[in-house]
Amino acid sequence: MNSIIVYHGGTEVVKEPLCNYGRKNLDFGLGFYVTNIREQAIIWANNMSRNRNKPALLNRYKLNKEALLKEAKCKIFNAYNEEWLRFIIANRAGLNVANEFDYVEGGVANDRVVDTVNLFIAGLIDLNGALRELSKHQPNNQMCILNQDVINKYLIYDGTEEL
């Protein structure tokens, strides 16, 4: 099995991830979020730790991404572009456009770009201005698994460490 290591930062040990648990209206909808960027997951864990006053934990998994991409309905964003921007806005507005996919991957609307997204939503900059600002940033990476069968088949828990 060709697996990659992915991480889920938080304050709980998550041995059996669920796709229908958590906050709604996130970038890629309601699902289980991981990243292949360890440092990014550590930042998420530390932020949650401060907010919840609990220890920061880093859950590690093996993801058979190659098989997942062949067998599941996937959407991958390789850049901060108009399609990504509209997808993020629609999901954050509760339109749940991610629900038609089993797996979505792409950049995070985080501190580096969220101001641009919010200015566009508020109508304070136009599409071209938003895309110009977004193009200045290299996307980090988040992966959202929206289908429990996909989680069960392709994601294997590989341990948790306290940070």
Image (cartoon, rainbow, N blue to C red):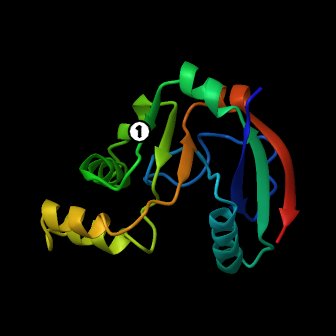
Looking at the picture, tell me which residue is in the foreground, 85 or 121. Answer: 85
Number of dots carrying numbers: 1
Residue 66 % position (x, y): 62, 28
Looking at the picture, tell me which residue is in the foreground, 115 or 130. Answer: 130
Image quadrant holding the N terminus, namely: top right
Residue 134 % position (x, y): 30, 65
Looking at the picture, tell me which residue is in the foreground, 51 or 151. Answer: 151
Please state which amino acid type lies under the numbered disc 1.
Answer: Ala
Image quadrant holding the C terminus, namely: bottom right
Q: Who's the residue at 35% across and 52% down the image?
A: 88
Q: Is residue 54 left or right of residue 29?
A: right
The residue furthest top is 71
Looking at the picture, tell me which residue is in the foreground, 53 or 119. Answer: 119
Q: Is residue 155 left or right of residue 26?
A: right
Q: Quarter of the image holding residue 43?
A: bottom right
Q: Is residue 3 left or right of residue 158?
A: left
Residue 65 % position (x, y): 63, 33
Q: Quarter of the image holding residue 15?
A: top right
Q: Who's the residue at 59% across and 40% down the image?
A: 20
Residue 112 % position (x, y): 42, 73
Label 1 residue SS: helix
Q: Who's the residue at 57% across and 19% down the image?
A: 71
Neighbours of disc 1 within 10 Å: few (<14), some (14-19), many (20+) = many
Q: Is residue 33 left or right of residue 97?
A: right
Mark 1 highlights which residue? 98
